[in-house]
Image (spheres, rainbow, N blue to C red):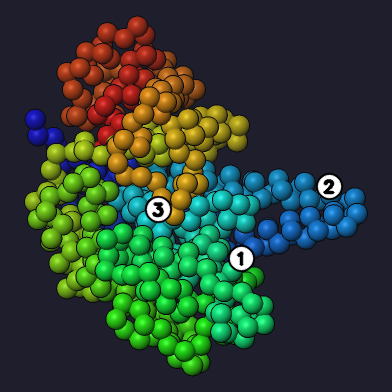
Amino acid sequence: MAHSPETISAFRYGFGLGQHQPTATPENLIAQLHAADTITQAYPTFGFDAAVAQFSEFARLTKAEKSGDAQAGQQRQQARKDMRKIQEDALRHVFFRAMYSPNQFRERLVHFWLNHFTVSAKNARLSLLVIPFVEEAIRPHIASNFTTLLTQATLHPAMLDYLDQSASIGPNSIAGRRRDRGLNENLARELLELHTLGVNGAYTQTDVRQLAELLTGLRTGRQGMIYQRQWAEPGTEQILGKTYGGDRPQLAHIHEFLDDLARRADTATHITRKLAVHFFSDNPPQDLLAHMASTYRVSGGDLMQVYGAMLTNKHSFSAIGAKVRTPFEYVVSGLRALGITSTEAENYSSRHFRRDITLPMRLMGQVMFRPAGPDGWPEDASAWITPSNLAGRLQWAMQITRATGRSQSLDPRLFLTQALGDLASKQTRFAASNAANRQEALALILASPEFNRR
């Protein structure tokens, strides 16, 4: 059975059906990326400067407490609460943006690129830096050229901290000779393997080593990314068949390399395939892949043209359901389907937000901003469709219908269309109509295979 473009668009390119449902055309989806990003004004977060101020004050008080300052100990506890509060408020606003933005395609792209350029909150400092990374490196640049997005993500303090770039010193640099320290290859390796060329890209370990030398000098400071020439490896580097650098290292040499890297054919193939896998299936149609990769190469990595190639291809409104929603996508889509108003969401207490959102997501297998490694959250269905994760989804479906009061106010027959449009199968309709009560019926719809997929 063919499904309506509205339903396909909502599931493939957005966070499901809801009160902000744009017209389902390629032109409208592209127009969303041209529109003003007003949802960020409604739900602001914070940037790098605010994060550094919070963490620096906490670190200062920690040091003072260790030196025996009793008053500093009390202030440190308050500083810890302040850090948690700013993070929690920002996390809530991340959810609200996804739930209420009329530009659903933009929100999906933000989370796609955030996962592509993974920065995991593996410590207290990074827990504060992830949000600025989204706000400064990712969100403003998703409709730009891939060179710009790649450069912003690579040189952001969050990425440099996450991949321990500040620990990388040119062995023959002034600092390297003085401190007898050497390279850290983390950023170089992930830059080639994950962010651009792909695991099967045409690069060698020598390229990784030479790139690591080129990247020395990149560090983080209170003002953000800094380039310290005395830490940078002098001389030229041979990377992917081209010479970069010189006796006097410069940040411009790194920019030059990133621009070249973004334009390589392997990068075009890897990036466009990841987009197609995310929005279509784990094995996208070959003609779609070829069209997107060709558009990338010809345009020099113009992301708007790449999105246009994806959205205007004959497969753009083909059958959906090949992908499984991540827990974040599932929860946001569930809240949208239930018709949770912005007033209701904004009045949620911290305790209720943790009870109904973040803790259930943990049971489903996802802790926000904390993927296990730099490759981010997995795309394949097997990672999410496990007995324990499915149990977490069913438990949440029962819990959220009761907690939001929808089990008393929402007619399951109406909710079938509200949540699934014309996707509801005979089996789901039968199960919902034969449920023991209204809450069970609503939960069965949320737990249905159709709702868990996109």
Task: Work out whether residue 141 can be spotted.
Answer: no
Instruction: Assign the N terminus to one quadrant of the image.
Output: top left
Residue closest to the eye, 25 or 427? 427
Which three-letter amino acid code belongs to the residue tagged 3?
Answer: Asp
Residue drawn at (42%, 26%), measured in percent from left and top? 388
Q: Earlier in the sequence, mark 2 or mark 1?
A: 1
Q: Which mark is residue 49?
A: 1
Q: Secondary structure at mark 3?
A: loop
The amino acid type of the residue labelled 1 equals: Asp
CA–CA distance in space, label 1 to label 3: 27 Å
Residue ID for mark 3: 375
Indicate the quadrant where residue 171 lies.
bottom right
Could you tell me which secondary element the residue under label 1 belongs to? helix
Query: In the image, what residue type sits under mark 2?
Result: Gln
The numbered mark at residue 74 is 2
Q: How many marks?
A: 3
Q: 391 and 302: which one is in front? A: 391
Rendering coords of residue 275 (x, y %): 26, 54
Residue at 22%, 63% (x, y): give it.
269
Q: Is residue 430 visible?
A: yes
